[in-house]
Image (spheres, rainbow, N blue to C red):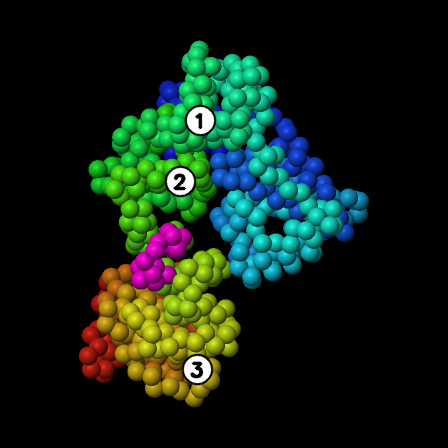
Amino acid sequence: MSRVGPDADVSSPGAVAERPSFDEFAPPAHGRIADLLVAATTRTGAGHGSVILVSAPSGTGKTAYLEQWSRVLERQASVVTWDRGAPSRDFWTRMPDEWFVSDDPDVPGPSPRRVLIVDDAHQISGPDDVSAVVELLDRMPAHTAIVFCARYDPPLPWHRYARDHRFTRIGETDLALRADEIADSLGESAVVLNHVQAERIRELTSGWLILVSAVADRLAGRRDVDDCIDGLASSPRPPTDDLIGSLIADLPEHLRALACRTAVVQSFDRDLAIHLAGTGHDVTDIDTALWDLAAQRFPVIIAGYRESRTYYTYPGLVRAYLQAELRRSGISPDNVLRSAAMWSMHRRRSVDALSLALQMSDPEELSTVLVTSGIRMVIAGDVAGFEVLLNRWCRVAPGSAEPTIMRALVAAERGDLAASSMHLNEVDRAAVSGADLTCLLGALRLVADARHRPGGNDRPIGWLDPVGVQDEVRAFALMTAGSVHISRGDLSWARRVWVAPMPSPRRHLSTCCASGSALIARPQQVGVGTWRACAAGHARPSRARVRAAGRRTTTSRSVRRWRRWGSTSPGNRPLPNR
């Protein structure tokens, strides 16, 4: 990963000149590792593409080497990098066919080569994911290559690929810097080493990239190189503790506190860093703090980009030491995780909230995040992404009711009502606690009942509207119920569901419900899923569809009709026209 600073205004030439260089934590500019990878991608056997496993502990520079190599490889091949954890089963089973097809089938040989790089591949562990990966590897053509980057070996049949002469393993020994490479790397920091000094550093650091970078930081600007190496060798602490510990201890107190808190999460953006740092920091302070960390030669790196946000992180080995430093200061990492997860959930960052919650030890709080953020992801159409996180949740808390209900939701969203009913039958109603789960379970049971008993169902609306349910979950359940009743022609029940009070202040809920009352007379004009999308604000019925239904589109008229229907149901207050 490339080393960068935060997003800041770079319009001033002077500001650019004053910014620190981030190249000191990049891999040395030599071609040994790149040559290994190039040779590995050309190993094909049994008519299939090459399989490469880069397996080494955190801190050895795996990701940095692969990123450097991929930038060079992009001139000669089509490169796809997956760096957000283990891909879902859908990613492997629905790999685009064009990725496997050569651009010019009349030209013999690969034209061009296609390479897939999967970072953090050690997260591939479930039986479904493993079988999907094996199936993909068994059918990949000869002009393709897949590179797995992992801290330890994923449970794949590597011996089969080795038997077919298409497998290459690049381990810790291969990634370790040699003495001449260490001398060249430190030479870029104006540190001149002879062969004996470089060999001693290699023995102390095992050639790990992050430790060699820390040694370069310690030796920068010093003439007593031998004395510094002697001090490192004679230290009572292991070299890793000495180097990384000194790197953290040398930080100013406010920077050390920020680094320790942000190291609890796998990656963070500026807004999350502001929240974790406390109310005493604003955006300018966070920007300055990140630049100050880089100026201290501390490894702040880019973790990726998502939804127009830049995410930062630290090398895995440095993160582990920062978390230990946080515990020594009397702050529990679980409390920081909980705060970050709840903050992400309230800011509607569903993927971040679920990823953070999966690291928490409190199953009750995890359940809250799972239901709320999971429904948001499903409504937004990210069913595959949610299923990956749901599979991880099932491994964290097996046997609980929450993931079973959410699996039923995913199956129903994909149209597999048989699987949804099967999951619902596994749920013990007495074991379901919490208003959100009760509300969601009621909506899913309505969908299942509509499949088995299309003639109708008099399940009370109170089952869909328990006291204390979150507005978003409640709106989703009521819209689902209304859609079910419309799909089977039960317009009377649809009206009763849709006139239930909606306390949510979000205006689009009021608008879509009012428009729903206008379309109730001609349900064939609008798809059933439209209203469920409306419940999350991701869709609104078009004016053309409303006209096709023979009704006006004016919201005030719709709300007046809504109020007229609502007055016939005791206890239902009118929907406010916000």
**Residue type, mark 2 in image:** Ala
Q: Which residue is mark 1?
A: 214
> In the picture, residue 248 is in which quadrant?
top left
- Secondary structure, mark 3, is helix
Q: Provide the residue span drawn in magenta.
A: 353-370
The residue at the point 47 percent across, 84 percent down is: 452
> In the picture, residue 231 is in which quadrant?
top left
The residue at the point 38 percent across, 63 percent down is: 375
Q: Which residue is mark 3?
A: 450
The residue at the point 74 percent across, 46 percent down is: 165
Between discs 2 and 1, the one toward the N terminus: 1
Q: Is 509 on the left-hand or right-hand side of 156?
A: left
Determine crowd level at label 1: few under 14, some 14-19, many 20+ residues with C-alpha closer than 10 A: many
Between discs 3 and 1, the one toward the N terminus: 1
Q: Residue 431: where, in percent of width, then height? A: 34, 74
User: What number is the disc on residue 320?
Assistant: 2
